[in-house]
Amino acid sequence: MSKKHKQAPASQPDNRLQSLIRSVVTLRRPPAEELARCTRAEKYRRLREHNGQARTRLLHWINEHGLSDEVIQVSEPTVFNTLFVIGTRHAINELSHAPDVLHVAEDSDITTDLPRIDARDAQTSQPVDQSRESEEE
């Protein structure tokens, strides 16, 4: 074999799969007028159903666009209009073009005011239920 023709490297895992990221996908909600006429239980049921249908459409879209190998996980739907998705940066970027998707953010872009618990704190802290029991005694 000449030096000009290099031998193809042995098959290696796709580099994109080595850098998976977690993202939060915000879905379109049903019209507010539609939900305003509902009882709380009915609103809960409709939101969950709506988000379940949106998740199904998203999974079909992912498959149709050849991203199935790059999207590792799509969370189950809840009443909130968000899904958590784990995938490659490429796939996560493409999700913004999917139906029902309003916004895609990396999980690290989401900030909350909830305190973080270190492993040391978790080992020394009492569960809340136990501390309440000791107060009642």
Image (cartoon, helix red, strand yellow):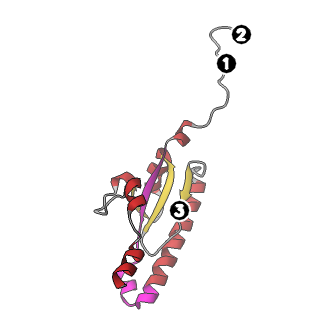
Q: Which element carries disc 1, helix, strand or loop?
A: loop
| 36 vs 69: above or below | below
| 22 vs 75: above or below | above
From the top left corner, tell me how far across and down residue 30 is, in percent: 41, 77
Residue designated by label 3: 58
The 10 Å Cα crowd at callout 2, few under 14, some 14 to 19, many 20 or more, is few
From the top left corner, tell me how far across and down residue 44 is, in percent: 45, 83
Label 3 to label 1: alpha-carbon separation: 40 Å
Hey, what amino acid is under mark 1? Answer: Gln
From the top left corner, tell me how far across and down residue 16 is, in percent: 53, 40
Image quarter (top left, top right, bottom left or bottom right) of the N terminus = top right
| 3 vs 89: above or below | above
Q: Earlier in the sequence, mark 3 or mark 1?
A: 1
The 10 Å Cα crowd at callout 1, few under 14, some 14 to 19, many 20 or more, is few
Q: Earlier in the sequence, mark 1 or mark 2?
A: 2
Q: Is residue 129 magenta?
A: no
For the residues bearing labels 1 and 2, Cβ distance under 8 angstroms:
yes
Residue designated by label 2: 1
Q: Which element carries disc 3, helix, strand or loop?
A: helix
Disc number for residue 7:
1
Residue at screen point 60% across, 48% down? 69
Q: Nearer the viewer, residue 21 or 56?
A: 21
For the residues bearing labels 2 and 3, Cβ distance under 8 angstroms:
no
Image quarter (top left, top right, bottom left or bottom right) of the C terminus = bottom left
Residue that extends furthest to the left in the rendered view of this protein? 113
Residue at screen point 59% across, 49% down? 66
